[in-house]
Image: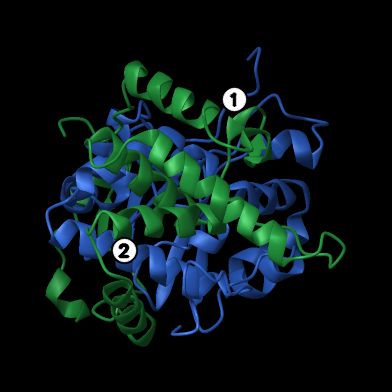
Amino acid sequence: MTDYHPAEGTFPRSSEEIAARVKALEAILIEKGLISTDAIDYMSSVYENEVGPQLGAKVVARAWSDPEFKQRLLTDAVGTCRELGVGGLQGEEMKVLENTDTVNNIVVCTLCSCYPWPVLGLPPNWYKYPAYRARAARDPRGVMAEFGYTPGPDVEIRVWDSSAELRYWVLPQRPGGTDGFTEEQLAELVTRDSLIGVTAANAPVGN
Amino acid sequence: MDQLNQRPDQHTVARLGELVEDLPFAERIPRRSGDVAFDEAWEIRAFSIATALHTEGRFEWPEFQSRLISSIERWESENSTTNGRDWSYYERWMLALEEVVESRGMVTPDEIDRRTKQILETPANANHQHAVREPITVSPAASTAHLGERWPIDRTPSAHS
C-alpha cells in the first residue's frame, strides 16, 4: 500500500485495497468528528438500490426457470453461483433458503452486518441498524409488515443469522402470471429486499 | 429512525442529482437506466463520503470538481489510450477526495496509509466467524401455533463470539 500516493496514481490496485482505503478514510473522518456515519448512510441510501442485486437476480431467474439448477443452488450455493460467473466468495460458505407456500425465510446478521455482497450488492442501511437486527429475530412478521409484506398465518417464518462464516440469502417464490417469461424478464422482478426475505418478489406489471 | 423502510427525502435526491450533473466528465459516470450506478460497495461509499462532507459544509463542490478534473487529466497524460485500460471514475474520485481532505488538513496521507494497512490485516467480521446453522427464530404457522413460539431458543448472540 505504501506505493500508493494520490499524486502518482499507481494503478492498478486490487478492489480489496481500494475498498480498505475508502473504509479507512471514512473511519478517520468519523473518529475526528468531521462527519457522521448517519450523514454518509443517508447519502448512500439515495443510490443504494443502484449497487443492485443484479447478480442475485440473475441467479434467482435461472433457478425459477431450471429446476435442476435450483436443486444444485440449494445444495451448493457457492459452486452453483460460480456457474454463472458469480464469485468473490472464496473461503466463505453461503446457503440459499427457499421460500415455499408454507415457509418464508428472512435473513439478519444479529451482531454486525454480514451479507453476501458479491451476490446481493451493497446491504441496505437498515440491514445494519440495531432496530432491524433486534426486531427481525424478535418479531419477524412485524418487520415484514413494515415493508408492506404480510405472509398468511399458515406460513411459518424462519429467521436466519448470517455470520462471516456462513451467509444466507433467500430464494423468493416465482410470482404468478409469469408463464413464458424469459430469464431477463424474471430477473427484473427480483428485488434486493426479496433476497433478504423482508418482501416477496415483485408481481409483473399489469397483475 | 422510526421506520426501517425509510426513503430519502426528495430534496436530497434532487440536490444529489444536481451535484452529479455538475461533475466533470459527467457523461462518463457509470449509469444504468439513466440513474447513477455503482458496481462495488466501496464506490458508493466513496461517493457518499464526498457528497456528505460537502453537504455538511466541509468543502465547496467546485473544489472537489477541480481536483477530480486534475486527477482524471493526470491519468490521461500518464497512460496511453491504446494500452487497453481505461480510467475508472471512482478510482479517480477517491484520489480527488483524498486530495481535498488532505489539503484542508482533515487527514494526512500517512493516517490513511496506516489505517488502510490495519484494515487489510484484520480478517473481515473477526467477531462474527461462527456459522449459525439453524434458524434463530421460528414464528410458526397458525396450524402449528399450539406448539408455541420456539423463541427464545437457547442461542443468544453471545454464542457467536
- Tag 2, which chain? A
- Tag 1, which chain? A
Is circle 1 on the same chain as circle 2?
Answer: yes
Chain B hue? green
Identify the secondary structure beneath mark 1.
Answer: loop
Taking the image as drawn, is residue B123 in sight?
Answer: no
Q: Position of residue A138 (x, y in %)?
A: 16, 50
Residue at 42% from the left image edge and 43% from the top image edge? B64
What amino acid type is highlighted by mark number 1? Ala
Q: Position of residue B131 (x, y in %)?
A: 35, 78
Front residue of this view, candidates A74 and A128: A128
| Foreground disc of the pair 1, 2 | 2
Q: In which quarter of the view is residue A147 placed?
A: top left
Residue labelled with disc 1: A203
Q: Is residue A151 above or below residue A9?
A: above
Q: Quadrant of the N terminus of chain A?
A: bottom left
What amino acid type is highlighted by mark number 2? Leu
Residue labelled with disc 2: A25
| Horizontal side of residue B19 vs B51, given as left or right | right
Residue at 59% from the left image edge and 72% from the top image edge? A88
Front residue of this view, candidates A97 and B93: B93
Q: Is residue B157 above or below residue A107?
A: below
Taking the image as drawn, is residue A54 in sight?
Answer: yes
Q: Where is residue A55 in the image (x, y as percent from the top left)?
A: 64, 53
Q: In this view, does A96 lie above or below B146?
A: below
